[in-house]
Image (cartoon, helix red, strand yellow):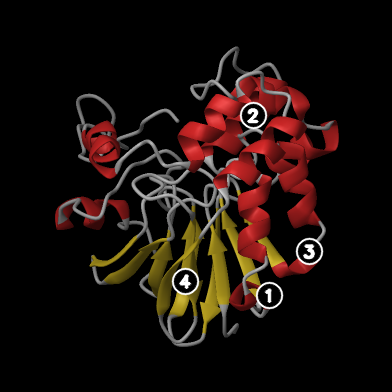
Amino acid sequence: MVHRVAVLSDIHGVLPAAEAVLAEADVVAADLIVLTGDIACGPQPTHVLDLFAGLGDRVVWIRGNADRELVEYRRGMRTSIPDPIGPSAADSLRAEQVDFLAGLPTSHTVEVDGLGEVLFCHATPRDDEEVVLVDSPAERWERVFSGLPSTVTTVVCGHTHMPYTRLAAGRLVVNPGSVGMPYGRAGAHWALLGSGVQLRRTPLDVESATQDIVARSTFVQAAEWADHCLNARTGEAEAFALFAGSSADDPAHDPTGRVEG
């Protein structure tokens, strides 16, 4: 059993944001740092992977859909990636980093003091692209969690880049938001789990972070990407509209409610 867990999701290859969160006293003191996917697809993928690899066994890695897409692109399993920055990120990865991402699990379960058995995943426990939102109906959550053991009391997920907590299907659901590509409010969003759940936000010097990204990224539109993503120019209303069509089951179309991205 662990006492304190820092959860970082959807870092999207933004080194300054990752460094800022890692400098937080509560992250330094945490027993574990769990990365709930979409770690590398962004402007500084190799730097971000090296940063967390340097922390050794304190880090629990979970693969997100964007990480999977980088691997598939590099291995010739796809010819494009939905995120425009994806091909640049994929091409910049070292071969051993591609292999590392390919081998990551899609979920991990940890006993956390005060919360019980906590399952960490990227989107949902059953699919790395499935969309569930804070306002998704109870019936949908029941279907999403239908295959989980009854011992799992808390599910921590990411993917939608908007932080929230709620009760659903008898379980606590936690989404820490995004470290590197926040929707709705700028800053690096993350969560601290222990005797309870805290949704946290680390302010980011966007100008300095943008300069760092431009200096070290191979993506030709890095400056524009950083301006849009670090300033959270995708607002919450736009994000909800983007995800709305994928947050309800449509058996005739796709029962998992997937979106690309």
- Separation of residues labelled 4 and 1 (CA atoms): 21 Å
The residue furthest top is 79
- Separation of residues labelled 3 and 2 (CA atoms): 23 Å
- Labels 3 & 2 near each other (Cβ < 8 A): no
Q: Amino acid at mark 1?
A: Val
- Labels 4 & 1 near each other (Cβ < 8 A): no
Q: Name the quarter where the N terminus is drawn.
A: bottom right
Q: Secondary structure at mark 2?
A: helix
At 43% from the left edge and 43% from the top edge, which residue is drawn? 127
Which residue is label 3 attached to? 55
- The residue lying toward the viewer, choosing from 36 and 164, is 164
Which residue is label 4 attached to? 118
Q: Secondary structure at mark 1?
A: helix
Mark 1 vs mark 3, foreground winner is 1
Q: Amino acid at mark 4?
A: Val
- Separation of residues labelled 1 and 3 (CA atoms): 11 Å
Mark 4 vs mark 1, foreground winner is 1
Q: Is residue 144 left or right of residue 230?
A: left
Mark 2 vs mark 4, foreground winner is 2
- The residue lying toward the viewer, choosing from 4 and 258, is 4
Looking at the image, tell me whether mark 4 or mark 1 is earlier in sequence order.
1
Residue 142 in percent (x, y) is at 23, 57
Which residue is label 2 attached to? 70
Looking at the image, tell me whether mark 4 or mark 3 is earlier in sequence order.
3
Which residue is label 1 attached to? 28
